[in-house]
Image (spheres, rainbow, N blue to C red):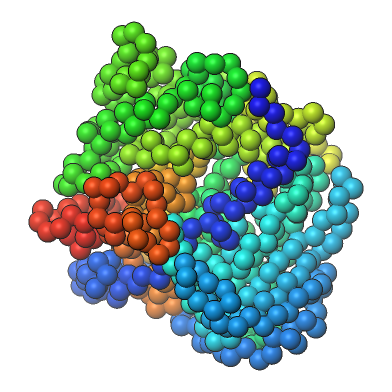
């Protein structure tokens, strides 16, 4: 039996903190969408293959272009003072000392410090650790880098412009960037959840404490505060961003949301239900990721992916290994009908009746003990056969979701001594988990759905009215946070705005992409540049060009890119509900031959 000790949980938490938005998660290259404001209702294709559209009839403020300034003196920032804040480092970093994908980052000042030191209810030391990097040639903008996993580490404050394979970053583009650990140390792993204030800082309060300090530090460094402020991240970083959209709409002008786990406790609980179902299908009773994976093997997952492609690939007019029309695909593909049923033993060419029933239900949405769906459906897509998909389903469900649910979100939390993650995941009653993640007591006065999720997520009226904007993307093969859930949220946002939210918030599906990056996909793109252009110039990106990371990519090769694709294939990511469709002629490897319709 595989056990999960406190030490190993802490190690895994540290690794998870590196995935999903900010820090060491993938970045996107600076690739201009070439947007320009269109007129007369026409679309204008810019040089990069992206398009812009006429804004809806309602006119909203355009906030104006930020004005930059030169850094005054890095060393003097060691003496910066702010309430409940200690500065520990103020270092001048010369150009080229820091590189991203071999590209030198410009000269900047690195400031490290902490806020609100205290001793927690668990007798552990706590503080909100942070790093700020302030470029010598500042563009007048501030970027809050929302990090992933369960936080706990101050990742390098470079600012992801999102996707897979770093080619550029917000710092190098001239932004002042902050990164934080959200109020706890990685060495604690999920056990920081034993302290109620650490839960709240992780959920939303660290942002409220860091934001005014960061803006004051910028003002001290440049003699003026930021003209425009942006907030972005992927995974839990996407959740942080959606929470900020709801809680702090006056503090930020642009929000860049990637694969958001904005209902993270419920998504984790759904992944636990998934693990229990795969365990029931496994050919062994050992509680390990490798054995859990025998419930839905690599060959079987590839079989299903190929069956999805057979039904859905050509729906967008091109048979190219990508399912662009995700919605039409769910209607066209049927797991029971389109995948052979095993007549005898499983051999990778069929699924058993039990597999079809359990796996089909997991894609339809995890159920509680009364048969009620408590989390989202997942779309059938082409990225199921990847390691990025299987690691979340078979490994992280045992080693990450267990600790997070058990200690960060449940009230009361589990007992730390003797806790075994795999045992918790595979033997816990889902109704007990759901009851405990929605409970409070005298010590834990906010439940997980209060401190982890955005309040009133479809009411962004304050953000909208002041001219702030949001761009949201999600991979359709994300195995942990469903793109269907983000799509559901966006549909509700549209409904709350008379059926159209596109004048202040846009949603882009990334076909084939796993969690934040990877999968058979074009996952390398810059969504920060079009967000800035929208906020500051009123230019709306109807599409953003994305590139595959095949052989020779400077930002790192994505092993999931099929050999049959051009290594630098491009596609437009279309603003929902539009879909990228082949024009009927031209090279299918180039975005310019597809149109968003």
Quarter of the image where the N terminus is located: top right
User: Which image quadrant is residue 535 in?
Assistant: bottom left
Question: Residue 405: x, y in percent?
Answer: 67, 36
Nearest the viewer among 54 and 115 is 115
Would residue 62 be visible to someone looking at this image? no
Quarter of the image where the C terminus is located: bottom left
Nearest the viewer among 129 and 432 is 129
Left or right of 404 on screen, residue 526: left
Q: Residue at x 58, y 64 (%)?
A: 145
| Location of residue 539 with respect to 288 vertically, above or below | below
Q: Residue at x 79, y 28 (%)?
A: 418
Q: Residue at x 44, y 77 (%)?
A: 536
Left or right of 132 on screen, residue 593: left
Would residue 297 be visible to someone looking at this image? yes
In the image, farthest residue toward the left: 585
Question: Residue 374: x, y in percent?
Answer: 53, 31
| Location of residue 426 with respect to 138 vertically, above or below | above
Nearest the viewer among 345 and 203 is 345
Nearest the viewer among 174 and 556 is 556
| Location of residue 551 with respect to 420 vertically, above or below | below
Question: Residue 329: x, y in percent?
Answer: 27, 37
């Amino acid at each position: 039996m595989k056990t999960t000790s406190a030490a190993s949980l802490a190690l895994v938490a540290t690794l998870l903190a590196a995935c999903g938005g900010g820090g060491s998660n993938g970045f996107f290259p600076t690739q201009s969408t070439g947007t320009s404001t269109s007129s007369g209702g026409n679309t204008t294709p810019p040089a990069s293959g992206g398009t812009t559209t006429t804004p809806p009839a309602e006119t909203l403020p355009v906030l104006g272009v930020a004005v930059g300034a030169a850094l005054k003196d890095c060393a003097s920032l060691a003496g910066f003072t702010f309430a409940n804040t200690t500065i520990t480092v103020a270092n001048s970093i010369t150009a080229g000392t820091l590189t991203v994908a071999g590209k030198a980052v410009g000269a900047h000042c690195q400031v490290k410090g902490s806020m609100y030191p205290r001793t927690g209810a668990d007798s552990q030391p706590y503080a909100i650790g942070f790093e700020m990097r302030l470029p010598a040639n500042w563009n007048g903008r501030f970027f809050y880098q929302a990090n992933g996993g369960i936080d706990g580490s101050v990742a390098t404050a470079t600012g992801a412009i999102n996707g897979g394979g770093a080619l550029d970053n917000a710092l190098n583009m001239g932004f002042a960037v902050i990164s934080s650990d959200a109020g706890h140390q990685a060495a604690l792993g999920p056990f920081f959840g034993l302290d109620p204030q650490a839960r709240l800082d992780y959920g939303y309060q660290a942002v409220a404490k860091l934001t005014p300090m960061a803006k004051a530090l910028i003002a001290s460094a440049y003699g003026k505060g930021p003209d425009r402020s942006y907030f972005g991240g992927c995974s839990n970083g996407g959740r942080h961003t959606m929470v900020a959209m709801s809680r702090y709409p006056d503090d930020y002008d642009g929000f860049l949301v990637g694969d958001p786990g904005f209902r993270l406790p419920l998504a984790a609980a759904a992944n636990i239900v998934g693990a229990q179902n795969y365990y029931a299908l496994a050919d062994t009773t050992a509680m390990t990721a490798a054995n859990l994976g025998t419930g839905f093997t690599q060959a079987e997952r590839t079989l299903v992916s190929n069956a999805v492609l057979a039904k859905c690939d050509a729906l967008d007019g091109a048979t190219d290994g990508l399912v662009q029309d995700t919605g039409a695909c769910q209607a066209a593909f049927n797991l029971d009908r389109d995948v052979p049923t095993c007549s005898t033993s499983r051999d990778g060419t069929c699924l058993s009746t039990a597999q079809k029933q359990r796996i089909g239900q997991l894609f339809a949405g995890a159920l509680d003990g009364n048969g009620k769906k408590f989390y989202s459906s997942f779309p059938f897509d082409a990225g199921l056969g990847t390691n990025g998909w299987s690691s979340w389903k078979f490994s992280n469900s045992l080693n990450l979701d267990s600790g997070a649910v058990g200690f960060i979100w449940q009230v009361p939390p589990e007992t730390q001594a003797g806790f075994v993650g795999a045992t918790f995941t595979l033997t816990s009653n889902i109704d007990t988990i759901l009851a405990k993640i929605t409970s409070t007591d005298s010590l834990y006065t906010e439940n997980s759905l209060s401190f982890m999720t955005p309040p009133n997520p479809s009411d962004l009226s304050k953000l909208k009215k002041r001219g702030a904007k949001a761009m949201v993307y999600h991979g359709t093969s994300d195995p942990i946070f469903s793109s269907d859930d983000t799509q559901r949220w966006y549909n509700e946002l549209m409904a709350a705005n008379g059926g159209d939210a596109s004048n202040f918030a846009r949603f882009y599906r990334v076909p084939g992409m796993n969690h934040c990056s990877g999968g058979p996909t074009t996952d390398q793109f810059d969504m920060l540049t079009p967000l800035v252009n929208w906020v500051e110039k009123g230019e709306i990106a109807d599409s953003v060009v994305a590139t595959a990371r095949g052989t020779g990519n400077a930002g790192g090769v994505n092993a999931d890119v099929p050999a049959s694709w051009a290594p630098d294939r491009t596609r437009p990511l279309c603003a929902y509900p539009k879909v990228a469709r082949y024009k009927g002629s031209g090279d299918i490897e180039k975005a310019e031959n597809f149109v968003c319709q």
